Image: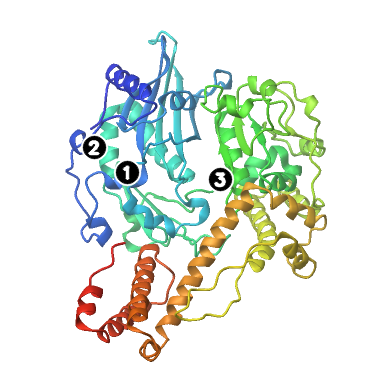
Amino acid sequence: MALRGSEEVEERMEEAEQGEDRELKISPAEEMPADGPGEDEPEPEQQLLLPWDRFSAWLHCICVVGFDLELGQAVEVIIFILLCKTSICYLSFPDSNSGCLGDTQFCFRFRQAAGSKSSLGCFLDHFDRDAPVCLKKDQGHFYGYVYFRQVRDKTLKRGYFQKSLVLISKLPYVTFFHSLLKLIAPEYFEKQEPCLEAACNDIDRWPTPCPGKILTLPIMGVVMKLRIPTCSDKPGTSQLVQSTPTDSLVSIVLPTIHEVDLFRCFYPVFFHIQMLWELVLLGEALVVMAPSPAESSETVLALVSCIAPLRYCSDFRPYFTIHDSEFKEYTTRTQAPPSVILGVTNPFFAKTLQHWPHIIRIGDMKQTGEMAKQMKVKKLKNLKTLDSKPGVYSAYKPFLNKDEEILKQLQKGVQQKRPSSAQNAILRRYFLELTQSFIIPLVRFSSFTSQMKPVISPPQLKPFVQEEFMKTLEKAGPQLTSRLKGDWIGLYRQFLKSPNFDGWFRNRRKEMTQKLEALHLEALCDEDLQLRIQKHTEVETVDLVLKLKEKLTQAEREQLPVRMGTLAKLQAHIDSVILSLPEDLQCILHKPVTP
């Protein structure tokens, strides 16, 4: 295993930091035994996997961070390659003021160093294409999932045992990785490195994270069963993992791999959920001040997910510290705060970020009677310390009128002690319907209606003209599906300036372009090419063959959504056209096109 003592790790990390976070030269093939058994009937892509590729499909690395009296937080164990050591060390421990005794779980997110490569192989990227936008692997960031333990220990000079087990991954499967840590971390704290070796060997036997399939994942004598959603799943529904006769071995069935409890997270700011939805939708700068990293990270993740199925396209940091490499960038007063959501626990941020326009203070609210006190949005000048009362501190004026029905429904649930899971389902459905009502007019406007013209290049999508879109809202706006009143036009105008619109529009254009290309290929298959080439010169026919071969290669490379048999039919058309040409040209054209 690539397990190293603290001294050797420190030396290697010193070299890595001098090279601006370049990768440690740890070779998994040499450092880790490749004796794991394969699958009985591996799929084609599984047969191409090398030892530890399955591990790398799920995790970038695993590390253990402890507390050194002289150095502070220090990496003690690394499995595979660790990037941004300093940031990970500080992000893996709660701030000293948090007072997190016992076991605490939270997550953080940090930028991928420029020029560094993820251990997730390119050959696994096709799995990512089938995932919903909110579950695609993060191209520019890593997620860190932390299990932190702090308990009294009189044998230690500091008087406390303090250590974190951290999983670093590109995958935003927060619920799954927290469940995984609950199995691995307690065992590790008892049995140390041998436990991690066993866990890593188990993970390298897992199938790759393929959306839509029921995955059975053995880990340290326990079997987890789950399903990764696909982009074709209906939003707001979860296809429950069905039990089978072999489930007697399954210990844990995960109904979701990524969703957090929205109601529990938003409970302290209960009356402002609609305003928070607007702020996230518009990509406004937001700070979440919480008493612990667990609460800050869950609240930030809840904010990001409240606009699903729309992807939040700005930066967000579930847990942010003063030691983060972006601290100066995000706290400067020389320019407007960036479009980012930060989760913080250090009281220092109450002063450093007091110029930010929107601050959410999260605290415990156990009595339903306290909820009435939180109805008004507080003024920013009232926020002087992290101990200020829970609430939303902002001068923002919402575009939409407050939805009293959802507030009454949830408040009634609190009074009747409705289960938190039911409250969460109600709130998640509300956010989903609100976002869909907002997005549907944009989807409708950006749809194409052009007719296919075979052989000629596929039609181009019409440009998005803001004023033309605004004119459509009067008859086909969100009022068709939402009961909310207010300044929808103003909300759309602001949204069209946001990073979320830019990200959505880029993804929409790509999706529509691929659909056009797919429809064009299907139209070509129905075309009588032999009749058409009778009017062509030899040069024109060769040009047609080259263009068709290029389209075929593109369709295979981009996995265009064509009907089954389309590509084979198009290949047959190409072959028949080539046979109509002289033999010397046939020999040339039958050579495969270089992608």
For marks 3 and 2 on the same chain, the one whose residue lies earlier in the sequence: 2
Residue 477: x %, y % from top left: 75, 65
Residue 316: x %, y % from top left: 57, 38
Q: Is mark 2 on a helix, strand or loop?
A: helix
Q: Is mark 3 on a helix, strand or loop?
A: loop
Q: In which quarter of the image is the C terminus?
A: bottom left
Q: In this view, does 340 lie to the left or right of 167?
A: right
In depth, the one of 504 and 35 nearer the eye is: 504
Which residue, given by chain and number where applicable, does mark 1 sit on?
A: 56
Please state the total of marks drawn on the protein image: 3
Q: Distance between the residues labelled 1 and 3?
A: 25 Å
CB of mark 1 within 8 Å of CB of mark 3?
Answer: no
Disc sitting over residue 181 in the figure: none
For marks 1 and 3 on the same chain, the one whose residue lies earlier in the sequence: 1
10 Å crowding of disc 2: few (<14), some (14-19), many (20+) = some
Which residue, given by chain and number where applicable, does mark 2 sit on?
A: 28
Q: In this view, does 533 lie above or below 286?
A: below
Q: Is residue 515 above or below residue 503?
A: below
